[in-house]
Amino acid sequence: MDSFPAIEIDKVKAWDFRLANINTSECLNVAYGVDANYLDGVGVSITSIVLNNRHINLDFYIIADVYNDAFFQKVAKLAEQYIN
C-alpha cells in the first residue's frame, strides 16, 4: 500500500463551550478517525477522557465516514454537560 485513501470531508461541526481566557496552547488534542459503527465508542471514550482530566484543556476532533443528526445532538449535549 503506497498511500492512504483520500477522503472528502463534507460536514464540519464545532462546539466551543470554553470559558473565557483559556490558553489554547496548553491543550490536549485528541483525534478520532472512525467509521459509523464506532461513533458510540467515540462518545464513551470522550466522556471518560473528560471525567478523568478535568484539570486539562481538551480539544476533540472526530473524522468519520458518515454522521447523523442524532450523533451531532449527542456530541453537543456532551460538550455542554462537561463545560469547564
Image (spheres, rainbow, N blue to C red):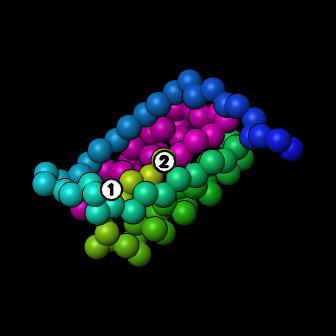
Mark in front: 2 vs 1? 2
- Amino acid of disc 1: Gln
Q: Is residue 25 left or right of residue 34?
A: left
Q: Is residue 37 magenta?
A: no
The residue located at (37%, 73%) in the rendering is 53
Q: Is residue 78 left or right of residue 4?
A: left
Does residue 77 appear anywhere in the picture? yes
Above or below residue 6? Residue 77 is below
* Residue 21 spot, x, y in % from top left: 13, 54
Above or below residue 69? Residue 23 is below
Above or below residue 66? Residue 23 is below
Locate residue 36: give its quadrant.
Answer: top right
Q: Is residue 32 left or right of residue 19?
A: right
Helix, strand or loop status at disc 1? helix
Along the viewing direction, whichever of 74 and 28 lies nearer the viewer:
28
The residue located at (48%, 57%) in the rendering is 30
The residue located at (75%, 35%) in the rendering is 5
Helix, strand or loop status at disc 2? strand
* Residue 6 spot, x, y in % from top left: 70, 31
Above or below residue 51? Residue 73 is above
- The total of numbered circles placed on residues is 2
Which mark, residue 47?
Answer: none
- Where does label 1 land, which residue? 81
Q: Which residues are magenta?
A: 62-84
- Where does label 2 land, which residue? 61
Does label 2 or label 1 sit earlier along the sequence?
A: 2
- Amino acid of disc 2: Tyr
User: How far, Cα to Cα, is label 2 from label 1?
Assistant: 18 Å
Does residue 83 appear anywhere in the picture? no
Along the viewing direction, whichever of 54 and 9 lies nearer the viewer:
9
